[in-house]
Amino acid sequence: MVGKEQLKPLKKLLVITPWYLPGTSAGGPVRSLSGLCELLKDECEIYIFTPAKDVITGIKYQGVILNEWTNYKKNIRLFYHDHTFKFKNLTEIIHLVKPNAVYFNNFWSLKYTWYPVRIISIRFPDLRLVLATRGMLDENSMRIKSLKKKAFLCFLKLTGWFKKVTFHATNTIEQQNIKKHLSNSVVKVVPNVNFIIPVIKEIKKNKGQLKMFFLSRISPIKKADYALEILKGVPENIKIEYDLYGNEEDMAYVEKCKIIASQMPGHIKVSFKGSVPLEKTAEIIADYHLLFLPSANENFGHAIVESMLCARPVLISDQTPWIGLEIFKAGMEFPLSQKDKFLKAIIQFAEMELYEWRMWCKGAQDFIHRAIDREKTKRDYLNLFFDEIKN
């Protein structure tokens, strides 16, 4: 006999987002949503409403069905809309799906966040609305186009739309940043989630050589130019390979980085490899000794987590949630003001023999496995959306 609990219908989560697979140019937000879906797909039905193109590159997705719900994976359905879709028809989507919660993923978007928030909060006042800021209100992010962003915040305060949502922060620093700009907001903290399948592989490591990679959007906040400038100081007796993977988002900035790369001495080899399909990420990571990503802001840092899951140490800034790495031989983190320490760390990793580097690989893997508690995170997300489970 089937128990009553087993017959209980699954709750429904509607996700409205300007970016999702197969597009990967947006970087972390796509990985975050993909990981969330994998985490919750046995616990609820997930409906993802998203455009039928990569909004950053403008490239249309091939082979997707337009303007109707299609099955993607177990309990996950996708709606790829094209330019003919009228956003006033979102009410029809709500009536059809009958979600228990709606999840938004771009703080700065009128089209994919705030206009839907306004419509839904008026016509479906009892429906829970949750907004992930994805680090967009962090200090370093706010410095980019700051006047435009401040004007947008004033607009939100005047309309009061921000009071209609529960904000999702992935750490306490992000929570503080949300409260700083929108003091009367409701904020809940639930850590980010990543569902990469790790690839663990043995590769050669010779003393005096180092193969590093950068995995992120090529944009000013990710500090590729900063990393390249540091490499100029590496002494001649050390050979470095540094490969940069990621969408070339800001072409003027990319050109600046390529000019710096062209000035490298002969013992430093730099290559720009372009974007990476999500399913290929782990294979690529496994071919390197070290992630070098001195980003000015990461509210989670998928590339950092993925690297450690694949047993690769990381060299990062202190502007991420991942600190105290050196104690565990998982990597190193430094303030961006201390370029000399980044350079010394690169030299230290380059000078390692194979046996020592393997210790750091194990340290990275052990560190991230201790840091991530998937079952607790799952419970926290169910509470965030549905208030279903008590911790």
Image: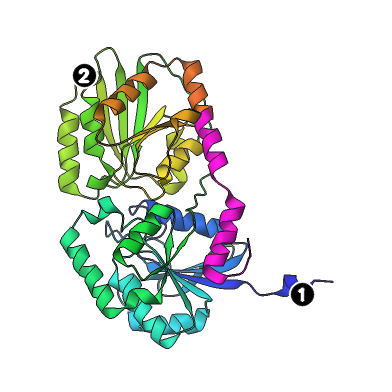
Q: 379 and 237: which one is in front? A: 379
Residue drawn at (16%, 62%), measured in percent from left and top?
Answer: 147
Q: 357 and 332: which one is in front? A: 332
Other residues around mark 1 within 10 Å, as few (<14) / some (14–19) / many (≥20)? few
Q: Quadrant of residue 178?
A: bottom left
In reply to whether residue 105 is colored magenta, the answer given is no
In reply to whether residue 373 is colored magenta, the answer given is yes
**In screen coordinates, is 121 left or right of 73?**
left
Question: Element at badge 2?
Answer: loop
Using the rendered image of the protein, determine whether residue 326 is visible from the camera's viewpoint.
Answer: yes
N-terminal-most mark, 2 or 1: 1
Residue drawn at (42%, 87%), measured in percent from left and top?
Answer: 123
Give the percent coordinates (x, y) of residue 187: 43, 65
Q: Quadrant of residue 112?
A: bottom left
Q: 34 and 145: which one is in front? A: 145
Give the percent coordinates (x, y) of residue 1: 85, 71
Question: Does 33 sit above or below residue 121?
Answer: above
Q: In the rendered structure, which amino acid carries the disc numbered 1?
A: Lys
Question: Element at badge 1?
Answer: helix
Give the percent coordinates (x, y) of residue 391: 63, 60
Residue under pointer 1: 4
Residue drawn at (32%, 67%), measured in percent from left and top?
Answer: 182
The part of the chain drawn in magenta is: 363-391
Residue under pointer 2: 266
Using the rendered image of the protein, determine whether residue 23 is visible from the camera's viewpoint.
Answer: no
Other residues around mark 2 within 10 Å, as few (<14) / some (14–19) / many (≥20)? few
Question: Does 228 sit above or below residue 252?
Answer: above
Q: CA distance from mark 2 to mark 1?
A: 70 Å
